[in-house]
Amino acid sequence: MPGDAIITVENLTKAYRIWERPSARLKSPLLEAAARIFPPNTPPRRALAARAARGYRDFYALREVSFSMRRGESIGIIGRNGSGKSTLLQLIAGTLTPTGGRVAISGRVSALLELGSGFNPDFTGRENVYLNGSIFGLGRREIDARFPAIAAFAEIDEFLDQPVKTYSSGMMMRLAFAVAVNVDPDILIVDEALSVGDVFFTQKCFTRIREILARGATLIFVSHDMAAVQNLCDRALLLHQGHLAFDGRPEECVARYFSLHQPGTGRTHVVPGTHPAVSSATRQALIARDVLPRARSRHGDRRLEIVAAAVLDHSGEPATDFEMMQKACVRMLLHAHGDIHRPSVGIQLFDRMANLVFAAGTTQLRFTLPALKPGEEIILDFKVTLSVYPGEYTLGLDAAEYNAENPNLGDFFDRVSGLGPITVSHHQPGSFPFYGIAQLPMEIAYS
């Protein structure tokens, strides 16, 4: 294995045979076996192999994926359903055999893949703890010593001595995760399992994952929760149709993921409206204050393009420092390069750990924009009260078109991330207006 790599994946490929008919499952392997009787490249061998191949086709769940991981690194793997994420994890965990390529691993792997995998449904929770512990290479004395910590973490109490087949999916995940994180893994693999638990247990799991990472363990994390990937991982892989499409910073990887999500159906026709033309002076003033060149990443075909953007204070001047509870104005100039029937524009605010603090736009606010023809432009102002805790934040901007099949996301044409930072401070005398990440609307009644 090269250097300090703890995991090396080289040209990893996994193909599944899709049979043309049930009888081909028997016929094709027999023909292949018969072909091997003859010397290579002889007419009988080629003829039999060709007949065998007519009974199936190969579906490639993963094709020639290569990457390596260093000890202590945390990698997120994202991609749409069917992109090959779970297949890749199973190959790394050793529960699948590759069609081609190889995986080299140095260290103890603790994998939380399919919910309840490795559990015997007829055994009790206690018996399954010992069964899983032995799979991870622990002796009975080691499991005895760790059992109290596992039981305390799982919090399923008297159900520990009930058969696992009587467990809910949440209880199954609690026990499986409790075992996985208490075997001192060198490599922890988590595949979407945390989505099953309640919010309190999920927070507890993330806290434990951070503790494991702090001890120098390596994490492979698969999730559709993009904020969690950006928060936990210092690197991310994007899989698309079985290929490795990107390997790099989580923020850019997430942006590329959303740029892939551009279905071409489900649009609702809207009669074009009217909007005032953008004056040359206003356009040039905004371009002079443009912050887009400082963006960390940008993706999309820009059929609806964000030409320029600026962050302004209450007096209309460019600003990056704001007082807590003040308003900031995010001004955007948008240009249509094609027919945009239902434009949708939004902003996102991220904290220093890349947690999504706030995201909304014209669709969520039910602010209908007029349809745009090629060459038309509009300027939008998003006025946001910075009711967030003091600190540094970054902005994301996006231009899209409403899609009835996916109204919260739409079809993205231009996605910009990593603008800023914007600093929010508190210099006013007296107490804070609130504590926590952000202020929520609240009313107090007295009777």
Image (cartoon, rainbow, N blue to C red):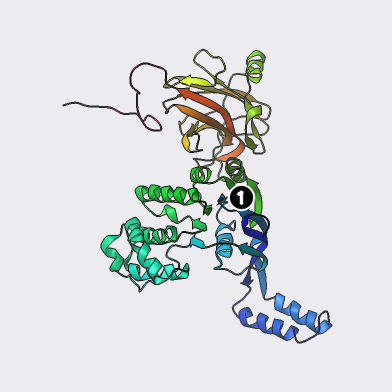
Q: Check residue 68 for magenta coloring.
A: no
Residue placed at 35% from the left, 23% from the top?
432
Residue placed at 40% from the left, 33% from the top?
437
User: Is 69 placed left or right of 116 in the picture?
Assistant: right
Query: 38 or 209, which lies in front?
Result: 209
Query: 305 or 226, which lies in front?
Result: 226
Q: Name the image quarter holding the C terminus.
A: top left
Above or below: residue 12 compared with residue 206: below
Residue placed at 58% from the left, 30% from the top?
419
**Spot occupied by residue 292 in the image (x, y as percentages of width and height):** 63, 27
> How many numbered marks appear?
1
Q: Which residues are magenta?
A: 427-447
Residue 170 in view of the camera: yes
User: Is 115 placed left or right of 240 in the picture?
Assistant: left
Q: Quadrant of residue 253?
A: top right
Query: 207 or 97, which lies in front?
Result: 207
Q: Quadrant of residue 16?
A: bottom right
SS under mark 1: strand
Quick one: which residue is furthest to the left in this view?
447
Number of other residues with Cα within 10 Å of mark 1, as a class: few under 14, some 14 to 19, many 20 or more = many
Q: Amino acid at mark 1?
A: Leu
Residue placed at 32% from the left, 61% from the top?
148
Query: 98 or 280, which lies in front?
Result: 98
Q: What residue would you read off at disc 1?
A: 238
**Spot occupied by residue 332 in the image (x, y as percentages of width and height):** 59, 24
Q: Quadrant of residue 144?
A: bottom left
